[in-house]
Amino acid sequence: MLVLDRLNVFYGQSQALYDISLRVKAGEFVTIIGANGAGKTTIMKAIMGLVRPKSGSIFFQGEDITSRPAWLRAEMGIGYVPEGRRVFPDLTVEENLRMGAYRRKNAAEIKRNKEKIFVMFPRLAERKNQLARTMSGGEQQMLAIGRALMVSPKLLLIDEVSMGLMPLLVNRAFKVMGEMNREGITVLLVEQNAKKALAAAHRGYVLETGRIVMEDSAGVLQVNPEIKKAYLGG
């Protein structure tokens, strides 16, 4: 479904990503783990079209999307939950969800997606007329995921879902991601909580200072001594 081929990304004169190549198959749950500043968010922004690679290619369902704008990538079926949630603070829950569907024309599909999200996140249904800025961090994370689901994504990019959340809400977020994946949505997650990420994913990539240094099944990475020492607390 997704192929990154030797992607190099710069911010000014500073190189952030070095020859990044990865693949995500349809139906997979793949995670990218790494420390803060490793380049995880830059990979997500490059896939979404928010930063332009200096070289390399991005393919989605066999099509080269390297030069396509972000809105067209969303229209093709790539959903994005950005780091820090980035909800529209002065819009209500319902208005935030509608913004997620702004490229969708099918009113029945929009209504169906919204109802599905309200079933998945009952708290959002309870607070559909509440301004997003008045909600807790956990509720905003639910809203950010719901907004991304409004595009009926084939591929869902999720950046640091656990950031700033209490453990109970982290568990809830990972449970929801697993449910979405079992329902057929392909998931690519970048996450600093490596233990949770590898427990949920099928495969994983390890990113260090802009380079992929390891890839394997999640189960193999979980028992790798180097990974355990560096990311799993021993």
Image (spheres, helix red, strand yellow):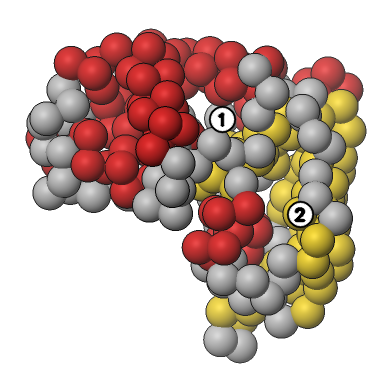
Relative to 182, is 39 above or below? below
Residue 59 point in image, percent of width and height: 80, 59
| Residue position for label 1 | 193
Camera-side residue of 35 and 100: 100
Residue 217 point in image, percent of width and height: 87, 27
Question: In the image, what residue occupies the spot 69% across and 33% down?
Answer: 186
Question: In the image, what residue occupies the spot 83% across and 37% down?
Answer: 25
Q: Earlier in the sequence, mark 1 or mark 2?
A: 2
| Residue position for label 2 | 60
Q: Which element type, helix, strand or loop, lies under badge 2? A: strand
Question: In the image, what residue occupies the spot 72% across and 70% down?
Answer: 66
Residue 3 point in image, percent of width and height: 82, 54
Camera-side residue of 81 and 124: 124
Q: Nearer the viewer, mark 1 or mark 2?
A: 2
* Residue type pointed to by label 2: Phe
Q: Quadrant of residue 219?
A: top right
In the rendering, which numbered label is found on residue 92?
none
Left or right: residue 91 compared with residue 211 = left
Camera-side residue of 161 and 207: 161
Q: Is residue 224 visible?
A: no
Camera-side residue of 167 and 202: 202
- Marks 1 and 2 close (CB-CB < 8 Å): no
Left or right: residue 69 compared with residue 2 = left
Where does the N terminus fall, quadrant-wise? top right
Relative to 183, is 7 above or below? below
Question: In the image, what residue occupies the spot 11% across and 30% down?
Answer: 129
Left or right: residue 58 compared with residue 199 = right
Residue 103 point in image, percent of width and height: 44, 54
Q: Is residue 2 visible?
A: yes
Q: Quadrant of residue 214?
A: top right
* Residue type pointed to by label 1: Asn
Q: Which element type, helix, strand or loop, lies under badge 1? A: loop
